[in-house]
Image (spheres, rainbow, N blue to C red):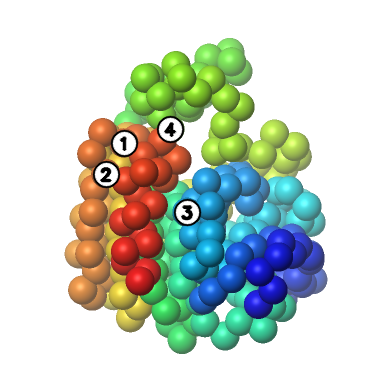
Amino acid sequence: MNPLAESGLAKAPDGTHIAYQVNGDGPPLLLLAGQANNHHWCDGVRDDFAGVRTTITLDYRGTGDSDKPDAPYSIEIFAQDALAVLDHLGIESADLYGTSMGGRTAQVIAGRFPQRVRKLILGCTSPGGAHGIERSDAVRRSLAQLDRNAARQALAELMYTPAWLAEHPGPHQTMGDLDMPDHARRHHLRASAGHDAWDLLPAIRSQTLVLHGADDVFNPAANAPLITGRIPDARLLMVEGARHAYFEEFRSVAGPLALDFLD
């Protein structure tokens, strides 16, 4: 693949146009972002693989330069969108690294289409459904405050430690796509909430690494061993001291762990 940056539009099965971005050189690695975020969520992670992987990102439907249809979304649909990007690029199989809702999407791709996935990294994610461990009511209340600034600060403190926020006041690329229309934001929320891969996880055949911040209460860290126990021969690594955005704040730890696993 061309080592220079490339971007374009792929067409999903329902005709929705999905924006994608390609950079680097080497075996393909698909990076999948969190809920209500565009591809910039993956900026730091992408840099960790410069020179050793061709990284592919995408803007979920409803975000970035992708179409934003006002119709129900689902993790299954996001998985089909991601596969449409790989098909458009002529990639039969790739490594996958999904974080947060991207990890949910990666679970579906790896479980339903095992031939498309070589190695799999699931970061700060959940199996969903009745077996997934939900965030506490206190966390939910902090995010539902009527004061939008207070709610956004609460989200920031769930993503990063106070010490890191003091030195990195933002803006942060993991805090959501501010240009998303309200209908797309609602569809993303419902899609993530509707995820349930518990029965699908044992079908994953890829070598799998589960990464999670040990202090994550946004997507509780207790989900990590649940996922690990359901996927055959999966490996679990907890990033001590990290919250939800472990891959950014603790990049010096998480990046080498991901690289070592993929190599």
Foreground: disc 1 or disc 3: 3
Instruction: Tell me the residue that label 2 is attached to.
Output: 239
Which residue is at a point 38% across and 19% down the rendered structure image? 162
- Indicate the position of residue 155 as horizontal and vertical percent values: 48, 27
Q: Which residue is mark 1?
A: 242
Q: Secondary structure at mark 1?
A: loop
Image position of 126 (left or right of 88)? left
The quarter in which the N terminus is drawn is: bottom right
10 Å crowding of disc 2: few (<14), some (14-19), many (20+): some
**Residue 120 is drawn in which quadrant?**
bottom left
In terms of image quadrants, where is residue 117? Answer: bottom left
Residue at figure coordinates x 61%, y 27% from the top left: 171
Of helix, strand and loop, which one carries label 3? helix
**Dot 4 crowding, Cα within 10 Å, few <14, some 14–19, many 20+:** many
Q: Nearer the viewer, residue 221 or 28?
A: 28
Residue on which the image places disc 4: 159
**Which label lies toward us, 2 or 3?**
3
Q: Please tell me the numbered disc located at residue 48.
A: 3
**Viewer-nearest residue: 228 or 260:** 260
Q: In the rendered structure, which amino acid carries the disc numbered 1? A: Ala
CB contact under 8 Å: marks 2 and 3: no
Between disc 4 and disc 2, whose residue precedes? Answer: 4
